[in-house]
Image (tube, rainbow, N blue to C red):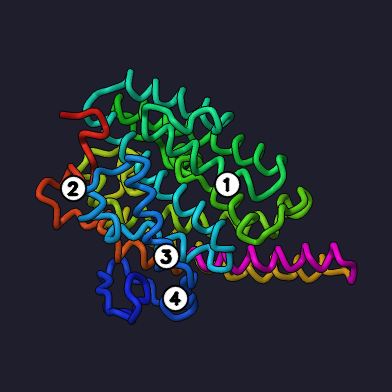
Amino acid sequence: MHALSHGTTSTPTTVAVPPALSLPVIEEEFPRQLHPYWPKLQETTRAWLLEKRLMSPDKVAEYADGLCYTDLMAGYYTTAPDEVLQAIADYSAWFFVWDDRHDRDIVHGRPASWRLLKDRLHTALDSPGDHLGHEDPVVAGLADSVLRLYGFLPDTWNARFARHFHTVIEAYDQEFHNRTEGIVPTVEEYLELRRLTFAHRIWTDLLEPSAGSELPDAVRKNPAYRKAALLSQEFAAWYNDLCSLPKEIAGSEVHNLGISLVTHEGLTLEEAIAEVRHRVEECIREFQQAEKEALRLADGLDDGTVGGKETGAAVRTCVATMRNWFSSVYWFHHESGRYRVDNWDDRSTPPYVDNEAAGEK
């Protein structure tokens, strides 16, 4: 079907959504928003990718805008201060580049290269100021983006973000092992690993600087808040699996909910696709209920005190941002060149990957 999109141009365009991936509930009940800073964001992140040598000039010129990395963040953190959104968008762009580097190290059998990068990223995360000039652009890029993110909220938030991202790095290491050894995780193993490789907690942590406030532990750990946050990220991860399945089958991937369902549950590919879609749709329905509960939590926090009013307002902002994730992720997958595998010369090799920067010749 066709649906109206407001993503990558100043005027609405019509984007074709394949029937198998169409979600009318998103198009009808989750109106898309875009941060007004987006045009400048796109320009600045493009320049940052060049400055940090994360993509070569020819790749940036040909693919950066079409990959829509800035669209994704500008459609998520729609009320963030401009400088916060810029730091998040640069970090997000870095994350995609890192993901591609990880993939190339697997495809080209470079375990030593991956282990070295993994260790360097752990170190840079803990002391980003010492790694801004690192010889490896992926290390230096992480250091730069994280150092900026660390400047918005107290050290307690910084420590939490670092702790959560250390687990993401280790999850990528587990994925490296699984793919190298051809191990397809069971459905439950996959779901647990996916919450880490998709960095559920990271994107949820970043709700707070975008709202301008570090939330108290009691709020972040409240079941109503946690459930809404988790569902927004589960939707994103599973819808990504649905959309990227052809790309990942072409690349001999083993990490996809559909692949785990086929391998361990005995489903046909068609049945697995239907099951992933069902899970995606259930996730949307559950979020709509969890959203109401989270907003009731926000109302209860607003107890008439200044602190209560500010915390309640911050929670409402965070919950509204969680809602944005549904529409932003949905349109990203239909606008970004990252998933258009049928248009590639080699279905197993994304054209936007900079092989030379990854150490290939």
> Of 291 and 89, which appears nearest the observer?
89
The residue drawn where x is 23% and y is 51% is 246
Q: In the rendered image of this protein, does residue 103 appear above or below residue 208?
A: above
Residue 124 showing in the rendered view? yes
The answer for how far apart the CA atoms under marks 3 and 1 are is 19 Å
Name the quadrant containing residue 44: bottom left
Lower sequence index among marks 2 and 4: 4
**Quarter occupied by the N terminus:** bottom left
**Disc 1 packing (10 Å; few <14; some 14–19; many ≥20):** many
* Residue that numbered label 2 is attached to: 351
Q: Which of marks 3 and 1 is in front?
A: 3
Lower sequence index among marks 3 and 1: 3
* Residue that numbered label 1 is attached to: 149
Secondary structure at numbered mark 3? helix
Lower sequence index among marks 1 and 4: 4
Q: Which amino acid does label 4 sit on?
A: Val
Q: Which amino acid does label 3 sit on?
A: Lys
* Residue that numbered label 4 is attached to: 25
* 147 horizontally vs 72: left or right: right
Residue 290 showing in the rendered view? no
Q: What stretch is highlighted in magenta?
A: 304-326
Q: Nearer the viewer, mark 3 or mark 2?
A: 3
